[in-house]
Amino acid sequence: MRLGVTLASLFAVSVAGAATAQTELSLWYHGAGSANAEEALVNQLVEEFNASQSDWKVLIETFPQLAYNDAVGAAALAGELPDILDVDGPVMPNWAWANYMQPLGIDEAKLEGYLPGPIGRWNGEVYSVGLWDAAVALTTRRSTLEKYDIRVPTLDAPWSLEEFNSALETISASGDFEYPLDLGMAWKGEWYPYAFSPLLQSFGGDIVDRTTYQTAEGVLNGDAALAFGEWWQGLFANNYVPGTSQDAADRETGLLEGQYAMSWNGNWAALPVVEAFGDDALFLPAPDFGNGSTIGAASWQFGVSATSEHPEGARAFIEFALQDKWFTAFSDGTGLIPVTATAAADTANYAPGGPLEVFYDLSEAQALVRPVTPGYIVQAKVFEKALSDIANGADVADTLDAAVDEINEDIESNSGYGH
Amino acid sequence: MASKLTRSDRAGWLMALPGAGLIATFIILPFFLAFAFSLTNQRLASPNPTEYVGFENYRDLLGLSIFTLEPERNEAGDVLVDDDGQIEYPRLRKFTRNNPDYPKLQGKREWFSWQSGENRTVVLASDVVFMKALVNTITFVLVVAPVQAGLALVLALLINQKLRGISLFRAVYFMPVVVSIVVVSILWQFIYSPGDGLLNNVLSGLTFGAFQPRDWLGETSTALGAIIAMSVWQGVGFHMVIWLSGLQTISPTLYEAAEIEGSSKWQVFRYVTWPGLRNTAILILIVITMQAFALFAQIDVMTQGGPLDSTQVLVFQAVERGYGKQDISGGSTISVILFVIVLCISLLQRWLTRERN
């Protein structure tokens, strides 16, 4: 009896407490235990937002990245999604289509001057916005290129296919390096479509036909894709790059230790290179294989869940986050690319003359988001397997045909994914 | 006359309820759900309604065709031969892709083929990856079950002696079992690392540099073998303990009697130890078979089914499709097929090892 009274009074206190205080909003974040300052900055962002106004109180819950997407899927099935979701750019269309998310509903004028990657659009509406973007570059040393008399490419004049091939051949023939190029084959999963599908696009192919998103026929197994596949297989057959069984530790340190002459790597790995090589470090644009040079875009972004009871609160939080000072803070803390030029000017690395400035230009000039379709999740897996198999010597045409069939069957069994 | 305990049914059921309830909720119900899902197009996340599709998922996995390729001929009807002297054939994709004359081959891929005279006979499968996974899984079981059971028995016989410090050996052999399989897999990845990995180093040291380093997990010829070796190493301690418990139930008087009769060591093993281990052997064989069919973590960590599907296995494919590709129905179908296979094999093992009167 006494226990009941105590519980009741406790309950009354907590209800009364909630009535006068801010309304609670839940936020799920994917970066638990992240190595850099990202997690701390997200926490700081939440704290400052909670202190800045009296209507809303964001409660953050963090997940390890590997379990995050599964947790969101499970929560959606159970109807327990948080108000604010953290979502990886290419996955967003799937979540929007599956009714995990609702349109953000913020004024698009506020997104003026943003890099294209951090804005997540699906069916003509903005669903998510990121506070940073990432870019990939051919990382190498000026002295290496000079030693072999290789032209240093620029954003306006990247290497052509022939130049790139002959550079690989020259460096390989010198025998000075274990491999002339490191593609990061040790990083399974999303790295493959993120880092390598732009190379396919530069050849003139793609993962899926972006005009309709209903088929991959002729795009992933057309002439351009076959040319890409043969070239890709050649990289491994000629021992220009380490294969799919590359040691993850070699991926991290191979360039720094002189095992590899060049490395196809992201801006998040650029600071150690600058520290090691100083002015000698070079971040080069992707070669132009005939159809322009492209790199991937879009990183993690924030959006509002479909079941949120307070979308206006969630929106207020995201709008609060979309300030140059946060872009600057995240960039300084994590080495990622700030999403506006004004924010970039204030950062340590992306300011004019900063060591990573080139990545902002790369992102601005060449970024192409991965296929914007709910089927991307499956297509990414199929693409990854096709590239691994071709690297390991599978027949190019048959492998790409099989990939096309699998993608098309998946699109069909999902009734076209709502395009 | 029945005692009060055996008559009070209600109390008995009540006591069984927690266990039975848990088993029903987490083992029996999911199994029936998997069977139901395998007859639909259920997705992990989709706004589209689930539809009943009959046995289409099974057809998509198990479909097979045999097709005979005739060689390319020139206008005179002679067989064309390429520079290496190999007979040239038309590409299969001419027949399997959008060819209205061969509707049965649509979307199928070559699984394997053989030469018969001038023609090449090709076996095509609707789902080559699944077929390879099936073959790899069965290979894995066929190798692991006898090797792991045999090795465990040898270890058990070795440590079933009264020697100083024998418990140290028991602990050492048992150690891999208590380490998480994920950790073991990552460690073995270092061991198998190409170039200057531990295994390559040891082998080239033992052969005074004659051994050429191999990419153990990166070559189709060695990847499955490498997985088998580490799996046996990891699991052998557990079955050693079961053998050991079996060995210790054999009465010492039997050994004493054998000694008095003057039997050799082999005779003791053959006529005393082995018959005494009969039930243990049945248990171990069934347990290893089931565990081997469930192979997943090593593949997931070490190879992801590669290179070229040489380490694809059924459970990895079920998870990859169900969660990775959000195709719950496809994953469920593989699970049901796996269940039927394991059930058949267990029944067969029970029948083969039955008590004969």
Image: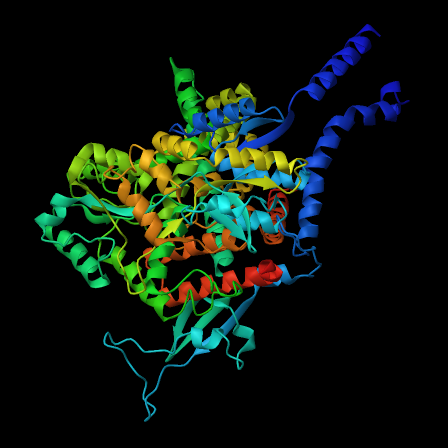
Q: Looking at the image, which residue sits at the far right?
A: B1
Vertically, is B162 above or below A87?
A: above
Residue B4 in picture, x, y percent from top left: 89, 19
- Residue A329: quadrant of the picture: top left
- Quadrant where the image shows the C terminus of chain A: bottom right
Tell which of B136 and A265 is nearer to you. Answer: A265
Left or right: residue B210 versus residue B126 is left
Name the side, left or right, on which A321 lies relative to A99: left
Give the percent coordinates (x, y) of residue A412.
59, 63
* Quadrant occupied by the N terminus of chain A: top right
Determine whether B174 is above or below A230 in the image: above
Q: Is residue A180 above or below residue A349?
A: below
- Residue furthest to the front in view is A109
Looking at the image, which is closer to me, B259 or A212? Answer: A212
Q: Residue at the location (57% across, 65% down)?
A: B63
For image coordinates 70% across by 58% down, the residue present is B51
Check the image and name the residue furthest to the bottom.
Answer: B76
Q: Position of residue B330 (x, y in %)?
A: 59, 54
Q: How many marks?
A: 0
**Residue B127 visible at all:** no
The way the protein has been coloured in the rendering is rainbow
**Which quadrant of the structure image shows residue A316?**
top right
Front-most of residues B49 and A115: A115
- Asked if one can make out residue A294 in the rendered structure from this viewpoint, the answer is yes
Percent x, y of residue B24: 73, 36
